[in-house]
Amino acid sequence: MLSKISRPLLALVATPVVAALLVGASQGGGATPGSATAGDPYFPASGNGGYHVVHYGLDLGYTPETKQLQGAADLTVTPTQRLGSFYLDFSGMTVDSVRVDGRRAEFSRSGTELKVTPQRSLDRGRKVHVVVTYSGVPENVVDPDGSADGWIIQPDGSVFVANEPQGAMTWFPSNSHPKDKSTYDVAITVPNGWTAVSNGRLRDQRSHYGKTTFSWRESQPMAAYLSTASIGKFQTEQYVTAGGLPVYNAVAPSQAAEAGPVLAQLPAVIDWESRLFGRYPFDAAGSIVADAPDVGYALETQTRPIYDRAPDIGTLVHETAHQWFGDSVTLTKWQDIWLNEGFATYAEWLWSAEHGGLTTAQQFAADYALPATDSLWSFPAGDPGDGGHIFAKPPYERGAMVLEKLRQTVGDRAFFTILRTWASENRHGHGTSAEFIALSKKISHKNLDALFTTWLYGKGKPATP
Ligand code: ARG
Ligand code: ZN
């Protein structure tokens, strides 16, 4: 049997035509296709392999009346292997062209993957520019927990752009997994009277023939899920804090009265968190306050959190704390979401404790008093199980309980040293739960295995507080 099949095959291989085809298929010189996934089981379609995006240059034009978006995305890409082809995450829209270093590249689409095959394979370590031009009306993603994410168009044509965890692909082609962080230049052109707000510093704003272009630069590395390009008829405010940080606020007029006094506290909140967590990680700050209550959440978009309505002070404290925990120190797998949400929730606890609310110990006790049937205990903070549960109660509230438990075990001095060291050692980088546990042990000189096993990874309500 075997020999009967293999003999004719061998004969075929020997012919020059087939030999050429085989070389073509492997794209010569050891080039291989990049992977179509970052390998995260919570969001298998997010991210790709074989390259790192150093920088995104996005040039966008948006027409609120028709909801049409026109885009040119210029990605500076460093291959991490010799690449015959590679994938970008991109959903919806019409791709008009793809060029690699100026030469037209072949492309094809399937699901949320855009496959790019350059004319020549790419050398490992040699930077190239990948330029994708596209157009259409973007469609937001619906996450497994039912929430909307990505480019979320409001009835009046304004746009709420919040990409956690997977919405970046709805408005630009990207390597959309937090493992890969990049700097960004985002220019957005909108009709006069509209304002487009992205991350980092506003470098330029100019009007021409009835349209205004807002040019933003995020010069610290950013995960795609933290990018934004939100558009509205905002009231804007710009100032520089006493510490020299430029602040840019954009607020929907309907929310201005309520948001004003809360946003005014941003410099004080940044100072207070800087004392607790170490130097503020970015070179800009601010807020985007939309009138989009259907969205149902706020997001810690880098340097400039976005709120679906006027935030209360707790929410502002929460999203600001994420600038250290999530934005600067970023997770490498979505399972570790408590490193974001538990820490930001704990910042809220610390704020209340200092402003006449419960102490953190009382907050912990109040949570512990919840019955075993409460959703707080439905799964471990450190193991939500799938992408549908990352924004549920345990990573937030039980995540904060883990930190309070740690504080009570190691003492205030070691605890705040752990938080500050975590933020400084991983500044503009990444961290994992295992690394946080190792750091906590190293700084406290304590064996904390039982603590983390019970409070971070234990199923159900722990037997004792
Ligand atoms: N990280 C945000 C916060 O807690 C929540 C984002 C929720 N996103 C979603 N698609 N449900 O501040
Ligand atoms: Zn959060």
Image (cartoon, rainbow, N blue to C red):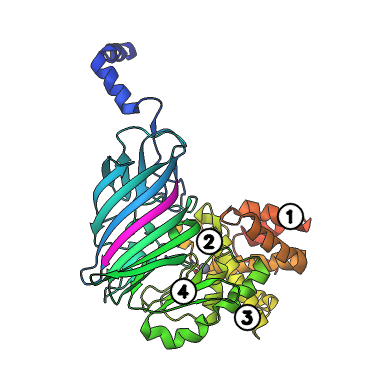
Q: Is residue 365 left or right of residue 165?
A: right
Q: Amino acid at mark 3?
A: Ser
| Magenta stretch, overall SS | strand
Instruction: Tell me if residue 55 is in the magenta stretch.
Output: yes
Instruction: Tell me if residue 267 is in the magenta stretch.
Output: no
As drawn, which residue projects farthest toward the right?
445
The structure residue drawn at horizontal position 50% and vertical position 73%, both measured from the top left corner, is: 247
Gap between marks 3 and 1 measured at Cα: 28 Å
Q: Which residues are magenta?
A: 53-62
Would you identify the image quadrant in which residue 34 lies? top left
Q: Is residue 440 left or right of residue 347?
A: right
Q: Is mark 2 within 8 Å of ligand 1?
A: no
The residue that disc 4 covers is: 248
The residue that disc 1 covers is: 441
The residue that disc 2 covers is: 327
Q: Secondary structure at mark 1?
A: helix
The residue that disc 3 covers is: 352
Query: Residue 446: x percent and y percent?
Result: 78, 56
Eye-nearest disc, 4 or 2: 4
Q: Residues within 10 Å of mark 1 (few under 14, many from 20)?
A: some
Query: Residue 242: x percent and y percent?
Result: 60, 77
Query: Residue 174: x percent and y percent?
Result: 38, 51
The C terminus, quarter of image: bottom right
Eye-nearest disc, 2 or 3: 2
Give above or below for 386 relative to 303.
above
